Amino acid sequence: MSASTYLAYDYPLLSVFWSMLWFFLWIMWFVLLFRVVVDIFRDDAMSGWAKAGWLVFTIVLPFLGVFVYVIARGKHMGRREVAQARSQQQAFDSYIRETAKGGGSSADELAKLSEIRAKGDITDAEFARAKELVLSGHGSGTSADVTATSRR
């Protein structure tokens, strides 16, 4: 066999360091490239033609396109990211508030209960138990709660 075999001691420590450095720089380059592409689409102030131009520029000449984009528009990249994070947090907070609020106020729940009783779906005793639950704040007073309460 004339092919030489490379063992671990044939690859010096400094070469390992340089290989790892180039690997991490390569990964960071792709992270920067994807952040620029995402920022191009995220920017609402830019027109569609401008977005297409920047996208073509970053695809055709990636190194030059990304560096020019970061120099020209990089100042506002962080602001747009923070604005999007804040809007997502506000949407999440409003969703949590709406979910935690439940069916509405106790007056609305009592009105629903009296409609259910007027239809004849629950008896007066079940209505009284559900009314106590709504007024004490332990239940929503819906028909599911009423039937669960009446079966106890």
Image (cartoon, rainbow, N blue to C red):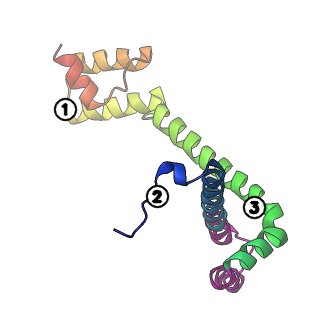
Q: Between residues 128 and 6, which one lies in front from this camera angle?
A: 6
Residue 11 position by quadrant: bottom right
Main secondary structure along the magenta-highlighted residues: helix
Q: CA distance from mark 1 to mark 2?
A: 84 Å
Nearer-N-terminus badge (2/3)? 2
Q: CA distance from mark 2 to mark 3?
A: 46 Å
Numbered disc in front, either 1 or 2: 2
x and y percent of residue 5 in the render?
A: 42, 60
According to the image, label 3 marks what residue?
A: 77
Q: Secondary structure at mark 3?
A: helix
Q: Between residues 147 and 30, which one lies in front from this camera angle?
A: 30
Check if mark 2's residue and mark 3's residue have beta carbons within 8 Å. no
At 39% across and 27% down in the image, what residue appears? 110
The C terminus appears in which quarter of the rendering? top left
What segment carries the magenta color? 34-61
Q: Is residue 120 magenta?
A: no
Q: Amino acid at mark 1?
A: Asp
Nearer-N-terminus badge (1/2)? 2
x and y percent of residue 46 in the render?
A: 73, 76
Numbered disc in front, either 2 or 3: 2
According to the image, label 1 marks what residue?
A: 121
Say above or below: 2 vs 87: below
